[in-house]
Every structure is written in C-alpha cells, then in structure tokens.
Amino acid sequence: MKNFFENFWRKKPQDLPGIGRLVGIATLMLGGVLFVGGIPALAIASQTIVDANAAADSLPLNLQTLPLPESTRILAADGTPIADLYQQNRVEVTIDQISKPMQEAILAIEDSRFYEHNGIDFRGTVRAYVTNQISGGVVQGGSTLTQQYVKNSLVLSAKTPEEAAAAKAKTIARKLREMRYSLAIERTNTKEEILSGYLNISYFGAGAHGVEAASKRYFSKSAIDLTVIEAATIAGIVQQPTGYDPIRNPARNENRRNQVLDRMVANNYLDSGEAENLKKISVKTYLNPTPIRNGCTGSISPFFCDYVVQVVRNDPAFGESQEERDRFLRESGAKITTTLNLKAQESAQTAVDKYIPRDDPSQKAAAISMVNSKTGEVIAMAQNRTWGTDGLGNTTYNYNVDAQHGGTAGMQAGSTFKVFTLLAALEQGYGPGTVLDASTPKTFTNFTACEEGAPVFEPYTVNNSTRSGVFDMNQGLAYSVNTYFMGLEELTGLCRPVDIAEKLGVKTGKGQPLERVPSFTLGTAPVTPLMMASAVSVFANHGTHCPTVVITEIMTRDGEEIPLSKKVCNSVVDPGTADTAALMLTNVIDGGIEGRTGARMTLGREAGGKTGTTNDSAAVWFVGFTPEISAAVWVGDPRGGYKYPMKNITINGKKYKQVFGSSLPGPIWKEALLGALADSPATSLELQPSWALTDKGIAPTFVPPPWCPPCPSCSAPPTTCARCWTAPSVRKS
C-alpha cells in the first residue's frame, strides 16, 4: 500500500488511467489514515468504490460556473453610493487588483504547491494529513485550492437545498466529483484565473464574500492595498470564518495569523525576522472595520432608496417574475444611478426634522417629495422617520409614495386639488376676474355625473374655513375659498378637472382612478406627496408634464448599459392657460392680496404654491413650484388623520388651536426649497399668460349671474343664466 501511494502521487493527473484510481486517495482525503501495525484502519466496501466510480465517470468534463453573486450598488446623481444590496456581499476583482502579499498569504496557508500540481496534489494531501495529526488540529488543508474553488462553485450554483447539501457531503462520490472537475478546470483556466476565482468566491467571515469585500470590511481599503500583516490576517480566516473573525475573536485570529506568517516564511515569501516582528503586533491596532449595511436601512436616504428598489421590483424589464427581479437587485452587481440630489435631500430631511422631530410625542408625520420641474426627475424624498420597525419615530412605510411602491393608500389632499379646477376653468374661458358668490354655508344642487344616465347628485352643503363673500378667481384662490371653487366646479363640470389631474399622474394611493364627485375640488381623494409634486410641475413647465423618473442609468458588472423605458413628456393644457394659472399661484405667495394663505412662504425668487387643509385638519398640505423645483409636503398622523386630528395639539413644543397648510407644511416647503436652491441664481418662470395684465393685476373679465337651472340654447348672454354661454371676450391677448 505504501508503494502504491508513493507511485500514485508522483503521477500527473492527465497520466492517470481512470477516475476509479482516485478512489483510494479520495478515501484518504476524507477520513485520513490511521496506521495500526501498518494496516489502514479505514476500509472501503468494494461496492462503494464501484458506485463512486460509476458516478464520477458520468460527470461532464467541464464545470459550468455561474457568475458570482455581486452587490448591486445604488448611486446618487453625482455618483455617491447611497446603498448596497446583496445576497452575498461581494465585489469581484481580477488578479491584478489583489496585492501580491495577499496572493502569497493564501497560497502559503491553503495550497503551497498550487503552481506545481494540476488540480490534485496527492503528495500535499498526505503531508497535510500527517501535519494535522502531529499538531493535534487542522493546520493545513487536505484539498487543493482548485478543489476548494470547485466545491464552493458547486455549492453556489446549487438550485435546491439537496444539491447544496450534496456539494458539501463527506462522501467519496463528492470528493471524486471535485477531483474530476479540478482536473478539467486546470486544463481550461490559467493558474491566475483559478486563484482569483478562489479569492472572489471564498467566504471571509463578518458578512464578507470575496477578498475585496473582506478587505473593505476589516481594513476599509481595497484588496490591492493589503499589506503583509493584513493579508495574513485575512488569509487565516477562510478555514473558520466565524472562529477566526478578528473583530469578534482577535486572540484566535492572531494565533491563526501567526501560523500564516510561518507558512509564508517556509515558502520563502517572507523573511523570518520580519515575520517575528509582525507577530508582536496586536490585530486590534491595525483593524479599521467598515460596518456592513445591506439594503436601504443604513442609507443616507433610506426612503428614497426603498422607492428605487420598489420601482425595479415592479418593472418587468428587470425580470419576468418577482423572483428574477429580486435576484437582479441582490446578485447582479449592477450599478444603478438615480436622480437623487444630495443637497436637496439634505435640505428636505433637515426641514422635516426641524419642524416635527422624529420622536415628537405628538407622533405626527411629515413627508416631502421634490422633483425637477422640467424633467420630472425625483431629486429628494424625506420624512421625519427613521427606517425601522420598532419604537417611536420608526417605520418602513414610505409616506411619499403609493402602496404599490412601499407606501400607503394615500392621504386626502385638501384644497391643493383646487389647482385642477383652476386649470379646467381657465381652459373653458372663465378668466381670473370671474366673480362668484362664495357665501357660507352654501348648498350646491346642480352637479351632474360624467356618465350618461347616472343619477343626479344629492344636494351638497359646503362651509368655508377662511373667508366668505363675493370674490373673483384671484381672491378665491388666494383665500382658498371652498364655496368659490365649488361654484367654479359647477361651471366646468366634473369631468375635465379630474381628467387634468389624472393626466398629471394623480390617482389614489391604491392605484385607483379618481372619483368624479362634487367633493373632488376639495381634495377628498387620498393621494401621495410624490404625485402632487409631479402634478404641480405643470405650472413651471408651461402646461407640459413629465412623468416621474428616479433611475437615469443602469450599468452591468461588465460595463454594459441596460436600456431603460423612456418617459415621454406630454402637453396637458394650453401653455397660455397653464401660465395664467401659474401666475395666479405666484400671487398666492408673493401677490398683493392681504390675508393670502401662502404669504409666509415667500422665497425671494419666483415661486407659486397652494395650501391644503382637510376637515378637522386630518391632513394638511403645501404644494408649490419654482422654475427649478416642484415639491409637495404632507403633515398628518399615520395612525389615522380623522382619529387623531390636528386640533388643540402641541407639536414640537408649540401649541396649535388648529394646524393649517400654512402652519407646518408651508414652512417645511419653504425651508427645504431655500436649502436646495441655496447658492443658485434666481431664474424666471418666463410666463406668457393668456389674460391681459393691468397695473392692479389681472384684469377682470366675465361675471356669471347667479346659478339657474339649465336653459335652452342661447346665442346671446342670458340675463338670468350663465350655464350655457361663455363670453367671447373672456380671453384677452
């Protein structure tokens, strides 16, 4: 038997006559040999050998390896990393991106004859066994580095738990399979390719897969920069990733590190004197660990990050099934460049935290979405919450987005919806000087459904929360008069305001169409800040709306760009109409009407906006725009706005009899915009409204008489009814 093994290990693998000749050495590698009186204690049944033989011979000649799972990185617009997503924390590198000491350290401790064997090192196997028996522990491995690479590849490529278990089972068949694949790999790959493959696939503990991730984890540097002592520290971990973790078990790691240094000396990679000096250094003195953060939890913008993840998970372009899309996110190694503007994000987060701290006893929430007015790119998304599941001020719900994208069913938008009725009225010829009786309370009885044959709506009584009287459109907007806009909605009908809102991307938080009901203009529909920020961008973009965009580029690990679905901007309303509405909304902030709701939100540059307050202040809003940024702010209670209304309440130490859109959302919007636009020159909206301007503002136009029942077709202005006639002189150039 002794002579057999002596001759066996001297042969080159390609010289071996058959795979069955490997059975004996496989047995040795599995269980070792305990010589008692010159007779091996380990015996193998002849049938086992035959079965193993047959199984090995049936294997394909080449190992089909899958691409290694790599971390997918999400980047801000300027390339700053904001999150890593992974199943295995790994960044694959080439051999020239790994320091020489690291290569030498791993070879010294794992396979010192790597460059001498062809995948199976019979001599090294026996030597390792003897060394381990003498030392009383596992000092040297029995498998070659190539075999370890094969084993890890088989485990990684396993499609079922059973396949994974078979790849790790201590059986002769498994060992023979490794040997056969090892021989094949050595014929088709260079030694450098195998070495880099091993270093990329191996687990180095502490959540680090591959040498690059390990280097970043333990020393906050790339693998190319690893020194001798750092390399020895990492190389020693592979055998027992948990036990030799230098962070958790520094003493055990030092002992193992010193073994690696000794092996480096024995293999002439290191001078013995230098090794002895390195052994005296405590591992604690040169560790510089970087915490591992998987996913959006530790991101600088966790809710924006989660929105990006949800966008990918909902897009079939990244996989036909949910499983495929999740795998793309966690294993592809792609780089996803987003639209996030770090300056705007920081400003938005600071603003919401300033006005309502995350741990405020009131438990009120604030959320803000900001988009590029011209492109629809989402540049910021913040809320006064920490990403997490437990404790005050923590949540994993994104209040900025809809339920499909990890958000909520939406929140009632209040008077911010009046902007859609405003557009419809202007479009139909009702000018800014349109005067209506806006007394309170007022009952409306003449709404008809959009659908033919639908029943007539019941009388609907509305109260004002600001002012009452007779107002033109400018005043009605500036004061946010409910009965004025209900009257205006009677003039426009229910269909067009809703159509405009939906063309601007507004739907319910559950993804359902908006209801065509009289209360529409009062904002009873539950929507999200992102929807509203996107919608009001139409006023800064002359009637054109661009759908929201959050991803600008995706590059594969190989540097290839993945095509993205194109977002098409559409003209929703006439530019002159949109510009007139925009001008009126700027008057809400910077106009001359005393008592206007947006007076506190002046930015010192052109800006327009609208407040929103629901019944009992269950939810309060501010939406607004500048030439550069459109944004929407919501404040409410995630536990239920009507159950926990904002009346007679203390928020951030300040007592409120009632919270309005101008009380908290407006100041948050202002502070966020000022920070985002700081150091940016003021620009113009460049409005060209369809209505003439006078020294006193926009000239009055048409004053409809009080409402009356439907009248016959009219060719001249009726004296008692305005329903079926639009004055030809309403629009002025």
Image (cartoon, grey):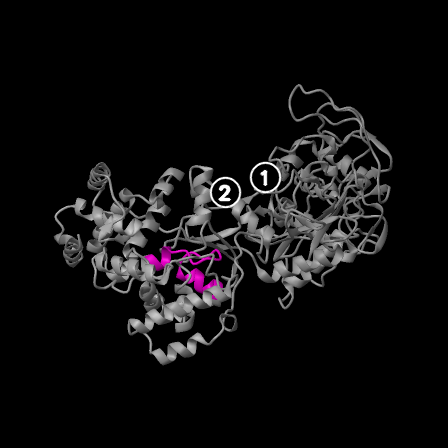
Residue under label 1: 503
Viewer-side residue, 361 vs 472: 361
Residue name at image x 37 percent, y 51 percent: 68
Q: Amino acid at mark 1?
A: Lys
Viewer-side residue, 635 vs 267: 267
Residue name at image x 34 percent, y 41 percent: 166
Residues packed near mark 1 inside 10 Å, few (<14), some (14 to 19) or many (20 plus): some
Picture coordinates of residue 259 (x, y %)? 38, 68
Picture coordinates of residue 677 (x, y %)? 64, 63
Badge number at residue 511? none
Viewer-side residue, 116 vs 405: 116
Q: Earlier in the sequence, mark 1 or mark 2?
A: 2
Name the mark nearer the viewer: 1 or 2: 2
Q: Is residue 137 magenta?
A: no
Residue under label 2: 313
Q: Is residue 100 above or below residue 412?
A: below
